[in-house]
Amino acid sequence: WPCPSTEDLEPPYLHGRLWAPDPADRGRRAPFGLVRHDPPVDLTDEQYPIRLTTGRRLDSYNTGVQSGGYSSPLRRGESVELCPEDAERYGVAVGEQVRVTSRRGSLLAPVWVDPALRPGLAFMSFHFPDEVDTNQLTIEANCPIAGTAEFKASAIRIEKVSTGGPALR
């Protein structure tokens, strides 16, 4: 059958030209601009000592399950992810309900412990607004350069609750 020679094969990864041995084959350089770092608008303090960042979870990223029409074996529902040190600090374990409060709202969510997170950082997704409306915790500030909402940096506090219940809205 037709089998190309190895010299004609494209690399098995995207943008292989960027690693070409000859710089002339790599194409033009990507434009980069320097931007001065501005701290988040919603700063942490004694009352709100944890930084909440929001995003997508692997089981829902770029898949049909984002719309909820498909199930995923990885999907476990919404939770607030904490590092082991913060979970210990608040005296909570995986599955326990906590109250997550920002300057804009409060909700209940179960805890998930993720050793990849650093102390002082929590993560939640926005995939389950009917169960846990994470976006009520986020700030409505916008990045002046990109024009995007600053959903990635909200100051929160975590409080252990004695009984479970539906998420507050």
Image (cartoon, helix red, strand yellow):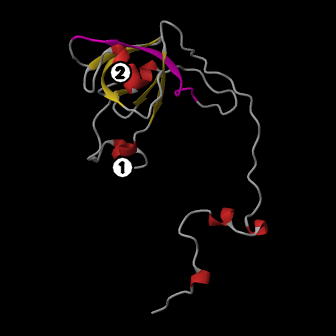
* Residue 81, x across and y down, in percent: 38, 28
Give the secondary structure at mark 2.
helix
The three-letter code of the residue at mark 1 reads Gly
Q: Residues within 10 Å of mark 1 (few under 14, many from 20)?
A: few
**Do we see residue 169 in this rendering?**
no
Q: Give the mark nearest the N terminus, 1 or 2.
A: 1
Q: Is residue 54 above or below residue 157?
A: below
Quadrant location of the N terminus in the rendered image: bottom left
Residue range in magenta is 149-162
Q: Quadrant of residue 29?
A: bottom right
- Is 23 part of what is drawn in magenta? no
Q: Secondary structure at mark 1?
A: helix
Task: Say whether residue 79 is left or right of residue 3.
Answer: left
Image coordinates of residue 48 in percent, x first then y, are 48, 11
51 sits left or right of 167 in the view: right
Q: Which residue is mark 2?
A: 87
Label 1 and label 2: CA atoms lie apart by: 32 Å
Q: Is residue 153 magenta?
A: yes
Query: Of tags 1 and 2, which is closer to the observer?
Result: 2
Q: Left or right? Give the position of 89 relative to 53.
A: left
Q: Residue at x 46, y 12 (%)?
A: 104
Q: Find residue 64 and name its label.
A: 1
